[in-house]
Amino acid sequence: MNMPRISHFAVALILGAVIARAQTPAGEASRGKDLYDKKYLCSACHGFSGQNGVGARLVPMKLTQAGFMAYVRHPHDTPTGMPPYTAKVMPDQELADIYAYIKSLPDSVKKAKDIPVLNDILNNQK
Ligand code: HEC
C-alpha cells in the first residue's frame, strides 16, 4: 500500500502551529474591558483609552499577541515599575482578553492633514 509521506518538517510545522495556538488563546474584548479597567488596573498607568498616563501608549497596539503576553508577564524594569503579571496572578485567557480589548480601542490621534488648522499650516509651507 502506498501511504502518503509526511516529512518531519511538515509535522514539526503543524506541531509548532498547534503549540503556538495553545499558548495564545483567542481573546474576548468584552471580557477584557473589566480586566483592563478594574481588576488589574492597567488603566491606572496606561489610561482608560490606552493612550495616556505614565505608561507607554498601548493604542494602536503594534505588538503581536505572543509579544504582548511575553511583555506583560515580564516587563522590562521601568522607573514607574509596571508590575510583572505572571501566570500566578493572571491566567493566559485573561491576558488574551485584555489584548483583544486593547486591539478594539480606537486610535483617537488624527493625522495633521485631517485637522483643518494643521492642514492649512501644512499647505502654506511653500
Ligand atoms: C504601575 C504602572 C503600570 C501598570 C499598572 C501597568 N503598566 Fe504597562 N507599562 C508601564 C510603563 C511605565 C511602561 C513603559 C515601559 C518602557 O517604555 O520601558 C509600560 C509598558 C507596557 C507595554 C509595552 C508597550 C510597548 O509598546 O512597548 C505593554 C504591552 C503594557 N505596558 C501593558 C500593560 C497591561 C496589559 C497592564 C495591565 C495588565 C499594564 N501594562 C499595567 C506601566 C504600567
Image (cartoon, grey):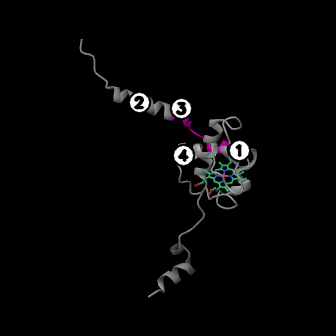
* Circle nearer the N terminus (3, 4): 3
Cα gap from disc 2 to disc 3, whole angstroms: 12 Å
Please, is residue 31 above or below residue 112 in the view? Answer: above
Q: Position of residue 55 (x, y in %)?
A: 67, 57
Which circle, 4 or 1, is nearer the viewer?
4
Cα gap from disc 1 to disc 3, whole angstroms: 21 Å
Residue type at mark 2 is Ile
Residue at 50% across, 34% down: 21
Residue 16 or residue 34, whichever sits in front: 16
* Circle nearer the N terminus (1, 3): 3
Instruction: Indicate if the residue with disc 1 has its beta carbon within 8 Å of ligand 1.
Output: yes
* Marker disc for residue 67: 4
Q: Position of residue 73 (x, y in %)?
A: 63, 42
Tell whether position 25 is magenta.
Answer: yes
Residue type at mark 3 is Ala
Which circle, 1 or 3, is nearer the viewer?
3
Residue at 66% across, 52% down: 77
Residue 89 or residue 95, whichever sits in front: 89
Which circle, 3 or 4, is nearer the viewer?
4
Cα gap from disc 4 to disc 2, whole angstroms: 21 Å
* Circle nearer the N terminus (4, 2): 2
* Magenta stretch, residue numbers: 21-31
Residue at 67% across, 39% down: 86
Q: Position of residue 54 (x, y in %)?
A: 70, 60
* Circle nearer the N terminus (2, 3): 2
* Marker disc for residue 14: 2
Q: Residues within 10 Å of mark 1 (few under 14, many from 20)?
A: many
Residue marked by disc 1: 35
Residue 107 or residue 96, whichever sits in front: 96
Residue marked by disc 3: 22
Residue type at mark 4 is Gly
